[in-house]
């Protein structure tokens, strides 16, 4: 777990933050880091033939009700008299775009959730998401290559000098950029090696791993580890599953905890309907998604990386609320 730099937090004081964001080397560096990450993201996907796609920020189908063990909430708004949701993920739309013959699709855009912000959660954050044809192993390989590419780009960018001055050490970036792959452990195995207090059961038969357990796994595996095959009912309905009751999904843990979540999707309408029923989600809210699976069955997998959590690890910082140059926190008015 990173110890965190000594940074004056102003995210909860809009007036003070405006001055701080204009003058502070911390926020100047974050602005440059974000620019390098966007450049590196474009270069990485262009090299793989994966296409950037344009997306709206509103959706009619919520891609999170999450698993039965989640407390994440959608953000519903009235848009010119039409009830709609601000996107918490555009994964469904990425799946749709793949059916236009693309070898892969990605975007970087804001995402919205109804939960309260804290040191590891933001109610508005930036998502780097991609979807490709294939399965879980294919998307894990993509994520690992992407992380290596981002770290390599930051190490060679002009902002590296600023970053080194803030953190004092870039060995964590060099280590990540040099890894061939990251270790993996199944969720069931993880529950056996972390302290029991970090394993909870919010619903009967649905176990989840607390942040403290993630930190123990990160330390145990030398800074980064995949936790794979969570209980199917503990993750969103759209994750494909196996007969043993687990889902073909994985979280990559480093820094503050989960930085990347990925998974394989149901390929057909029938499989999706079964999952909706098992998760107690009304299928009529997903008519268009089911129609897509029926009209164009396809095996795909995708991931979402939270940019602020990634940046927190890059900066070895312990509070994602300090990673927004222009904060958007639930319950805190904004001045800009």
Image: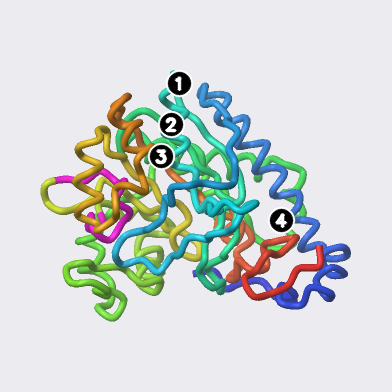
The boundaries of the magenta stretch are: 230-242
- Marks 3/2: CA distance? 12 Å
Which one is in front, 255 or 135? 135
Q: Residue furthest top?
A: 101
Query: N-terminal of the two: label 4 or label 2?
Result: 2
Q: Quadrant of residue 169?
A: bottom right
Local secondary structure at mark 1 = loop
Quadrant of the frame with the C terminus: bottom right
Label at residue 302: 3
Label at residue 163: 4
Residue, x 37% and y 54% (percent of image)?
Answer: 251
Density class for disc 2 (Cα within 10 Å; few <14, some 14-19, many ≥20) is: some
**Looking at the image, is mark 4 or mark 2 nearer the viewer?**
2
- When the figure is inspected, residue 98 is found, relative to residue 31, above or below; the finding is above
- When the figure is inspected, residue 331 is found, relative to residue 30, above or below; the finding is below
**Is residue 51 shown left or right of residue 285?**
right
- When the figure is inspected, residue 224 is found, relative to residue 4, above or below; the finding is above
- Marks 1/4: CA distance? 40 Å
> Where is mark 1, residue-wise?
100
Query: N-terminal of the two: label 3 or label 2?
Result: 2
- Marks 2/1: CA distance? 7 Å
């Amino acid at each position: 777990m990173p110890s965190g730099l000594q940074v004056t937090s102003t995210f909860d004081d809009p007036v003070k933050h405006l001055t701080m964001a204009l003058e502070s080397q911390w926020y100047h560096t974050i602005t440059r880091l974000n620019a390098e990450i966007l450049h590196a993201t474009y270069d990485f996907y262009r090299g793989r033939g994966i296409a950037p796609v344009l997306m709206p920020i509103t959706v009619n189908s919520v891609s999170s009700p999450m698993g039965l063990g989640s407390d994440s909430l959608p953000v519903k708004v009235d848009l010119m008299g039409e009830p709609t949701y601000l996107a918490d993920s555009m994964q469904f739309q990425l799946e749709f775009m793949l059916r236009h013959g693309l070898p892969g699709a990605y975007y970087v855009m804001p995402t919205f959730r109804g939960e309260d912000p804290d040191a590891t959660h933001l109610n508005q954050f930036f998502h780097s998401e991609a979807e490709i044809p294939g399965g879980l192993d294919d998307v894990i390989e993509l994520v690992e290559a992407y992380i290596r590419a981002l770290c390599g780009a930051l190490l060679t960018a002009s902002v590296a000098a600023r970053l080194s001055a803030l953190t004092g050490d870039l060995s964590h970036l060099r280590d990540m950029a040099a890894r061939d792959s990251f270790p993996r452990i199944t969720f069931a195995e993880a529950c056996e090696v972390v302290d029991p207090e970090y394993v909870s059961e919010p619903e009967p038969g649905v176990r989840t791993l607390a942040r403290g357990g993630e930190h123990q796994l990160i330390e145990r595996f030398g800074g980064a580890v995949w936790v794979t095959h969570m209980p199917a009912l503990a993750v969103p309905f759209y994750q494909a599953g196996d007969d043993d009751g687990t889902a073909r999904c994985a979280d990559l843990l480093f820094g503050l905890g989960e930085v990347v979540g990925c998974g394989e999707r149901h390929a057909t309408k029938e499989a999706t309907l079964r999952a909706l029923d098992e998760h107690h989600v009304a299928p009529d809210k997903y008519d268009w998604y089911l129609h897509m699976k029926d009209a164009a069955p396809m095996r795909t997998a995708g991931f979402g990386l939270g940019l602020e959590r990634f940046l927190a690890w890059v900066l070895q910082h312990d509070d994602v609320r300090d990673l927004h140059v222009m904060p958007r926190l639930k319950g805190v008015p904004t001045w800009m």
